[in-house]
Amino acid sequence: MFPKLPFLKKNPKDQSQVFIPSRRDFLKLSTLATGGFVLGVNFQCSGPKGESLTFAPNAYISISSDNQVTLVAHRSEMGTGIRTSLPQIMADELGADWSRIKIIQAEGDEEKYGNQNTDGSFSVRMFYEPMRKAGATARTMLIAAASNKWGVDPKECDTQKGKVFHSGSGKEIPFGDLVESLQNASLPAPESIELREFSSYQLIGKDVPIYDLKDITRGKAVFGADVNLPDMKIAVVLRGPVIGAKVVSFSDGKALAVPGVEQVVKISGPSFPPGLDKALEGVAVIASNTWSAIKGREALEVSWDLGENQNYNSEAQLAEMVKSTSQNGKVRRERGNFAQAKSSAAKVIERTYEAPFYAHATLEPPAAIAHVKSDGSCEVWSPSQHPQWARDAVASALDIDASLVKVNVTLLGGGFGRKSKPDYVVEAALLSKAAQAPVRVQWTREDDLHFDFYHSHSAQRIIA
């Protein structure tokens, strides 16, 4: 069900590399074009099962002459702190002043940033060593530049709080004052890079507030529904009451009579089952504001063909599953003789557990903004866990090349894997094309619970 990721491949050797971006690379990094010193890192690291994975570039460290250290967060922040912890690793090895750190959220682009699918709970495990290596390389270069300026042994120098200092003389110099010296510097040999001892870290393993804490608590943080574009429209969608339902006919007269409603658009969905990256069939109401869009949706009159799934009964299926647990299943692994152990046990505990379908119920319901422009390109703003899949899904839906789609990642109000699926992003793109304007698709809490990708229900009989 998940898309193939051609930029992932197995590789038996650790090939994480720190590099100085070429002029071509640098020009692509408009967010980092500070005129300062920039380092990048190509990732190669272990995946969740220990396999060796190679990624395209890149994470970046930028140091400007005013002592501003800018780090790129290439993973999505959904409340887990990953937008803080990965830059924190680089910053600690670098010896940067955390209060002077600026973090930029990367757009969805594997050519620049490698795999950005923030799913599976392995971001720190995957990127811990490469991030350390990048920070340590920048530190080594800063120390080399400072020790050369002072005429001292680099081994007598270290970095802390955004400065290089010399232990013997007490001299210190801010990172920004060394930027000019680093412009033509060569990278140190990888084998010469020494990582810090864990005990010396000032940030890793410490209680550090997340980078976005102040903005979140003050209501300034930008989540999906916080993005506002000039002339942006708001859309909500009336989807079928049953997955796989098709629109037979609809009347939009009452919806269009609601003040603020501007357009009603039918979305043609895929066949059954719909998949994870397609918009469900439905009728969308596009309005000047959210309230009008919701009231317009309530006024729609739609006739549905409920399709092959209309008679599905989850309660009956769960009862059938519970009944099936009384039968012996297929043995997948056998260690010892369970029947013999059970017959001779002093006490046997047997329980049957039932779990219903569970929705992710993220604090922030899905939302996405898309702007299909007159030149055929599309720009998206979305709380996405998997911006590259969102880009590809939008490109497919609009029948354009993926290079024409740009995905900007906002903060996520929870994810849990649900927001790695780009169905709601595709809705925004289709409706923006229809409206010829930027459109934000807003799911309500009811939409979120009704049309989620559920954790399946289950029945388990356990004997101990």
Image (tube, rainbow, N blue to C red):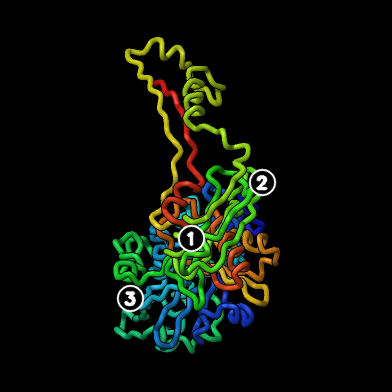
Residue at the spot of label 2: 271
Residue at the spot of label 3: 99
Measuring from the top left, give residue 350's x and y in whole percent: 38, 19
Residue 296 badge: 1
Type of amino acid at the residue the image marks with label 3: Ser
Type of amino acid at the residue the image marks with label 1: Gly
Which of the 4 image quarters holds residue 71? bottom left
Give above or below for 164 relative to 452. Answer: below
Q: Residues within 10 Å of mark 1 (few under 14, many from 20)?
A: many
The structure residue drawn at horizontal position 64% and vertical position 80%, both measured from the top left corner, is 24
Type of amino acid at the residue the image marks with label 2: Ser
Q: Is residue 315 left or right of residue 267?
A: left
Local SS, label 1:
helix
Q: Is residue 7 left or right of residue 66?
A: right
Return the disc, 3 or 2, that comes first in the chain's sequence.
Answer: 3
Residue 116 badge: none
